[in-house]
Amino acid sequence: MMQGTMMRWMASHGTALKTAVLQQVRLGGSGRSLVVLAQSRFQSSSAAGAPAAGARLEESGFESTTIADILKGKGKSADGSWLWCTTDDTVYDAVQSMTQHNVGALVVVKPGEQKAIAGIITERDYLRKIIVQGRSSKSTKVGDIMTEENKLITVKPNTRVLQAMQLMTDKRIRHIPVIDETGMVGMVSIGDVVRAVVSEHQQELNRLNAYIQGGY
């Protein structure tokens, strides 16, 4: 619980924390003192009152990776990037596709219109609306259980990964479609987003370590 709260705090205070760490580095702070600094900043912020859910994240600083960067890294042929089914497919066929490609969700499109997104179907939909309710996956259409387009939560290619992570955490979703002015361009999972955030913070830590060691 504490780790999750601190993770959200770091997401919204990353740039301020980096500035404070750099100040400590210039003053000759040790590795342990830097950890204590981060913890004390988190605790003092928590004591003053945690920021409201969905609070606006930093718009500048080293948190610059975007959803477009994730899609570029996955590539068009990567599992999960372009997988879809239609509203007329059976839930059984959709679940088979998820299993075959080892993904937890499929974008749902209208028959014959690959770019016209109609919704999304996830493992959670299958469990809650088929298994729990005792319905047949072979006779139920995807369109009957999917999350419809007007209820979809989406991001744009230029959305920053920290914003996407906070949005997915607040809404408790694990997959999010990526939409631009032309329509559907891909989908990312919470795993994709977390890996991107960890990678970016690791790069920043490496730069700070190089600074400490005299690499700058």
Image (tube, rainbow, N blue to C red):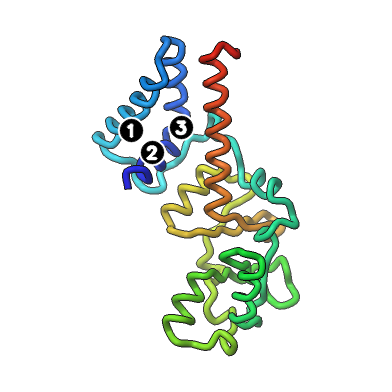
For the residues labelled 3 and 2, the Cα–Cα distance comes to 8 Å
Residue 91 - label: none
Mark 3 neighbour class, 10 Å CA radius: few under 14, some 14 to 19, many 20 or more: many
**Vertical placement of residue 21 versus 190, above or below:** above
**Amino acid marked by disc 1:** Phe
For the residues labelled 1 and 3, the Cα–Cα distance comes to 11 Å
Q: Earlier in the sequence, mark 1 or mark 3?
A: 3
Percent across and percent down for residue 114 are 73, 69
Left or right: residue 104 versus residue 19 is: right
**Amino acid marked by disc 2:** Trp
Q: Which residue is mark 1?
A: 42
Q: Which residue is mark 3?
A: 14
Q: How many marks?
A: 3
Q: Which residue is mark 2?
A: 9
The quarter holding residue 117 reads bottom right
Q: Earlier in the sequence, mark 1 or mark 2?
A: 2
| Front one among 190 and 111 | 190
Labels 1 and 2 touching (C-beta < 8 A): yes
